[in-house]
Image: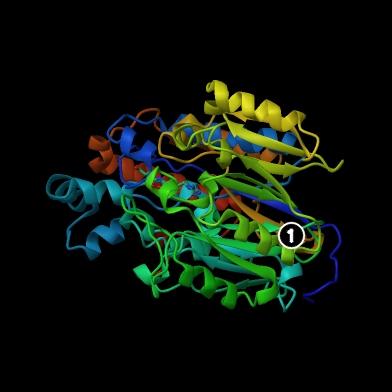
Amino acid sequence: MSGDLVKDDVLEVNFDGLVGPTHNYAGLAHGNVASMRHGGLASNPREAALQGLAKMKSLMDAGYAQGVLPPQQRPDLGALRSLGFFGSNAEVLARAGQEAPQILRAVCSASSMWTANAATITPSPDAPDGRVHFTPANLQSSFHRYLEPETTGRVLAAIFRDERHFVHHAQLPATPAFSDEGAANHTRLCGDPGEAGVHLFVYGRQAFGGGRAPKRYPARQTLEASQAIARQHGLEDARVVFAQQHPDAIDAGVFHNDVIAVGNGPVLLYHEMAFLDEEKTLDALRARMSSPLIPVRVPSEAIGLEDAVSTYLFNSQLLSNPDGSMTLVVPGECQENEAVWRTIQDLLLAGYNPIGEVTVKDVKQSMRNGGGPACLRLRVVLSAAERQALSGRVLMNDALYADLVSWVERHYRDSLTPDELADPQLADETLTALDELTRLLGIGNVYPFQLAP
Ligand code: SUG
């Protein structure tokens, strides 16, 4: 099935992560400057979830295919028990809150909302067996995110259940050599989405064999992890490019490639500091793509790295329209920065790229933890038959949107400080909410508390 056959009616479905009821600012992500800056602030989980849902709804209304993925079970009481906190749920939470508040914060993080880190996906036109391949990211760089892949795998397997169309691989070994952060470091470039694409994997360091690495902040993706995923999915060498992220960018707070570059179809919008070897990366892509690459380069003199990181211009979604044009979905912070907003206007006017429209979304609650519009979504390119084969009620429509808004309004708090995370009531509220959500979405039992021990 791979090779030159073009599949019909293939389009990208963006699956956004629904923000969980324990969304908080715990300052957990070293090297993510927004997370480090906002640690300790009070969050508003209800507003966060409604902002995310409003983004999904407006993109659906604009005609884009939109899906939703559920949050995870937090606090992760199983993780606390595995670390030696015993007793009733209330006792476990109280002891963790007193003896290890940082651990409690980690097991309460709603970080699974950033579904760009949930998995890496190869669409069926690119896979030798003509199926869609999924690998959950091991997220081993931080404890709070290392807790995600198990449930992520169950959720993806529940939704993409039909084995005729979907294949699920195990996450890579959760050890620094195979550090993997999923689709945030992976971009598929192509002409028509139904034709075979070229896969750009961006890594921050090599585990074996040296090379340059950042000095200040961690590199979260290794070359070896990216290579292993390409192998798992059966990608041909002729369709894969591995490029190193610029270590200076990582040291400036660019902890994933999707904080400094975004691709869609043949377009690659990137900052000049995105890749360690820019020319080599572009040449390698050009040599493999069957349609001409359209590089859209933003130089440092237009936007410095600091502004790129604080506004998240490159964490925009770049979406295809039926007339061949593209729409850039940027976070509100871009509009507030003169240089960034001017650069966006220049991009829209430039004749050499198909980006013809900008739309601004308010996702501030997520942005304060370093998650922009593109972090909040997992891109899944699907044919009509594959969309038909999805299980559960996960494709956004007006009725699902209304049900989810009402669910959030019934179950979410409008303020949460890190000190309140030990409240056993919060854990109870969350379990009640999630149990109802799995029924609402029709995905069956996916959470540890729903599974037999
Ligand atoms: O892994 N923040 C996330 C943000 C992930 C953004 N995703 C993409 N770029 N695709 C992270 O750094 C902060 C949680 C806290 O501090 O409470 C956090 O985990």
Please state the horizontal and vertical placement of residue 107, each as a whole percent of the image: 31, 52
**Side of 313 where 310 appears, left or right:** left
Please state the horizontal and vertical placement of residue 433, each as a whole percent of the image: 45, 44
**Side of 192 where 54 appears, left or right:** left
Please state the horizontal and vertical placement of residue 131, each as a whole percent of the image: 71, 72
Work out whether residue 293 or residue 277 is closer to the camera in this orientation and state it: 277
Quarter of the figure that contains the N terminus: bottom right
Work out whether residue 176 or residue 38 is closer to the camera in this orientation and state it: 176
Work out whether residue 135 or residue 19 is closer to the camera in this orientation and state it: 135
Other-residue count near label 1 (Cα within 10 Å), few / some / many at <14 / 14–19 / ≥20: many
Quarter of the figure that contains the C terminus: bottom left
Q: Secondary structure at mark 1?
A: strand
Q: Amino acid at mark 1?
A: Leu
Q: Residue at x 23, y 51 (%)?
A: 103
Please state the horizontal and vertical placement of residue 324, each as a whole percent of the image: 84, 43
Looking at the image, what colour scheme do you see?
Answer: rainbow
Task: Tell whether circle 1 marks a residue whose Cβ is less than 8 angstroms from ligand 1.
Answer: no
Q: Is residue 309 above or below residue 137?
A: above
Q: Is residue 282 among what the camera can see?
A: yes
**Side of 360 where 20 appears, left or right:** left
Q: Is residue 158 among what the camera can see?
A: no
Q: Residue at x 50, y 32 (%)?
A: 311
Q: Total marks drawn? A: 1
Residue identified by numbered label 1: 382
Direction left: furthest residue: 99
Q: Is residue 106 above or below residue 136?
A: above
Q: Residue at x 56, y 21 (%)?
A: 338
Q: Is residue 163 above or below residue 200?
A: below
